[in-house]
Image: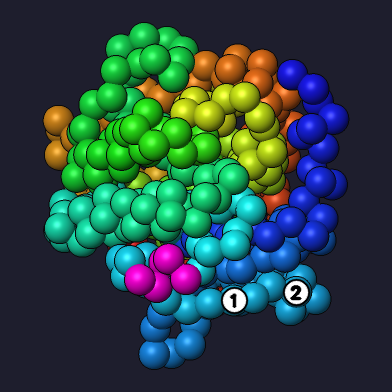
Amino acid sequence: MDKSVLDISNYRDKKVLVTGSAGFIGSHLAEACASLGAQVTALVHYNSAGSWGMLDKVPASLRGKMNVVAGDIQDAEFVRTIVADQEVVFHLAALIAIPYSYIAPRSYVRTNIEGTLNVLEAARSAGTPRVVHTSTSEVYGTALERPIAETHPLQGQSPYSATKIAADKLVESYHRSFELPVITVRPFNTFGPRQSARAFIPTVISQALVGEVIKLGSLDPLRDMTFVTDTVHGFLRAGLVQGYDGQVVNLGTGATQSVGDIAKTILRLMGSDKPIVTDASRIRPGGSEVLELVSDNRKAADILGWSPQVSLEEGLLQTIEYVRGDIGSYRTDRYNV
């Protein structure tokens, strides 16, 4: 691999589309692209309030450099218009909350599967030079082999993960059938500033700041936690790499800790002795819970020259600082699905 090709300064003046820019990772990725001088089109989901989601929290100096477009990934004609003329399409738009996928699975089919199909069709029609598709470690289900390599069997243990498996397979088919220049990145559990209380780390932090106890679901699942800036750098490098079309690449640290142990680390860093209690309403159905996720990240190192740079504790400290400064955005008296 010619590492000079993966110099992220090469994004300067490059036309880049980021779907899902209103989300946690998407807002960080759009911000990073803008900071590198790319011509960024940032897609946010249309809503009557005019909210741009987490993109509203990006510094105004960088947000002002983006062309923010509101629309719906489910609208094929609309998607075709925003994909046209783009040099790199980062496809992150998705419904990702696992608990909500138990309640409204059809909406996940429409967004995660049909939305991905719309992006693929638009990119095929436009001759887009690079599509970076976002998968998730949840497609692996509970680890059958450790660490989890990209060849690990895919197991649909929730409606969410099933729709992401389907989306991944659509991407694979478009590469095989139409030679679409796409690469799939499969982040493990990303965390950091701007993440909502849907995720357990900001849930712990926000409850520690204003609550009496820390309410969580199962404390036993093992998770591979990757700080958001590391995940974003993996995306950026995947957008530049040549010669690996159709490949899937894990983005994870290769280390794992239990949800309970991570929660205890957060409380230690915050100087809090609030008790952790199990809330039955937050526990997944038994067959749906993914008990262990730990990545094999050697492929990312080999083809992207990527490795995580931010330690768990360093990332937690940055996240604690962010949540403390934005505590008004967190509803700590309810279970956020």
Check the image and report above or below for 226 versus 293: below
Left or right of residue 310: residue 25? left
* Residue range highlighted in magenta: 77-81
Which residue is found at the position 50% from the left and 56% from the top?
126
Residue 79: horizontal and vertical position, in percent?
A: 41, 66
Left or right of residue 315: residue 112? left
> Which secondary structure is most common in the magenta stretch?
helix
Left or right of residue 245: residue 220? left
Is 320 part of what is drawn in magenta? no
Please state which amino acid type lies under the numbered disc 1: Val
Please state which amino acid type lies under the numbered disc 2: Lys
| Residue in the foreground of this view, choosing between 331 and 150 | 150
Q: How is the image coloured?
A: rainbow
| Residue in the foreground of this view, choosing between 190 and 329 | 190
Residue 78: horizontal and vertical position, in percent?
A: 39, 73
Which residue is found at the position 37% from the left and 65% from the top?
73
Left or right of residue 310: residue 109? left
Which residue is found at the position 74% from the left and 19% from the top?
1
Instruction: Name the residue carrying label 1.
Output: 68
Check the image and report above or below for 6 versus 190: above
Check the image and report above or below for 193 versus 151: below
Residue 249: horizontal and vertical position, in percent?
A: 52, 27
Crowding at mark 2 (Cα within 10 Å: few <14, some 14-19, many 20+): some
Residue 252 is drawn in which quadrant?
Answer: top right
Which residue is found at the position 33% from the left and 66% from the top?
76
| Residue at disc 2, secondary structure | loop
Q: Which mark is residue 65?
A: 2
| Residue at disc 1, secondary structure | strand
| Residue in the foreground of this view, choosing between 227 and 220 | 227
Crowding at mark 1 (Cα within 10 Å: few <14, some 14-19, many 20+): some
